[in-house]
Image (cartoon, rainbow, N blue to C red):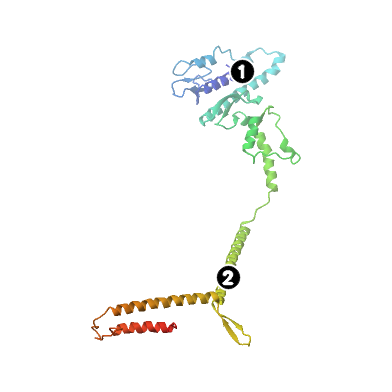
Amino acid sequence: MSLDQITTALSKYMLQGWVLTDQECANGCGVPLVRKKDFSKTVCVRCSNPNDESAPAESEKVSAAPGPDLSVEQALDVAPTPAAETAQPSEADRLLRRREQSERTVKAISQRMLEGYALLNDSCPNPDCYASPLVRKRDGPRECVTCNSKVMTEEEFAEYSRAQPTRFQEIPADTNPKVMEVDANVVPGTSTLATADRAASPVRKHETSKTEPGPSKKEAKRLKQKAKETSKKEVKQSKKETKRLKKQAKEAARAEAKPCATPSATGGPSSRPVGSLLSATLTSTERGIEILRQKLDQLHAQLAAVDEPCEICDVADASAQCSQALRKLLKVHGELQYLGVR
């Protein structure tokens, strides 16, 4: 069974839900074992013999009628001809290198599977990988464990570039000609992230050289302190302006309340009262006089209703029955006289 057939069989098992283990076959064929998720069966795709039970139907389909495998020893046992003697060592070396590479690929795939990667049905386009199957973790790019490169189509690379605009930016080709270099080993229609990384590093360097350095911490602190002092000055000036306006308003109110002195025709001063303040004063005086008159009438009515003499002063009078009533009357009369009521 050739290495390509072993790799294809492992890929089909993984796609069917089998788990690739890190254990090799006990027969010494060097192929890792695959098992079911419930640990019920373990199969070697080359020997097609499960370790505990018979091989499943899938393994029979994969490894049915394997042809004789041409090994290095069989190739060396062939009677060499003059032309074959020069070509035989190169073919043997190629087979040895391919076998070693396949073993490394199988171990690397097993490790990636244990890390949560999924085995895909696609193979690496690099001819030196000998159709090594690709792996992928969730929605990430496809990876080849043999050449350690990420393989993407043109559409996938364009979408990946849009998702990371700062890493993959297009710049003019005349800026740095090395940016446009393309690996000759890459198959047309695909692109590896290794080439993209090499192309992206000059872009980052080019962008960094053009960026201007920002202000230092000391300069930023000084600017912040200056802004704070400016705001304090503005607040202080606004407070002073408010106080000045209030003072002007008070002075204007006082000027309106005081009578304005204007010189008369004979040269002497004459008083001219302010109309609004004088009318308010007269209105309040008239209301006070009316209230005092009402109080006086009530007091006269109360005294007229009293017929008996007061128990304190024992004085009978038609207008007042005691000294307290007389004092009240005198007080009311005095207030009326003060207001100018005769």
Locate residue 244, reporting x and y percent: 58, 71
The residue that mark 1 highlights is 72
Q: What SS does tag 1 mark? A: helix
- Camera-nearest residue between 133 and 138: 138
- Mark 1: which amino acid? Val
Question: In the image, what residue occupies the spot 65% across and 30% down?
Answer: 155
Q: Where is residue 298 in the image (x, y as percent from the top left)?
A: 34, 76
Discs 2/1, front: 2
The amino acid beneath tag 2 is: Leu
Among numbered discs 2 and 1, the one appearing first in the sequence? 1
Residue at the right extreme, as displayed:
174
Asked if residue 150 lies left or right of residue 322, the reply is right
Residue 173 lies in quadrant: top right
Q: Which residue carries the number 2 mark?
A: 245
Task: Please name the residue shown 72% across and 36% down the image.
Answer: 180
Q: Which of the 4 image quarters holds residue 187?
A: top right
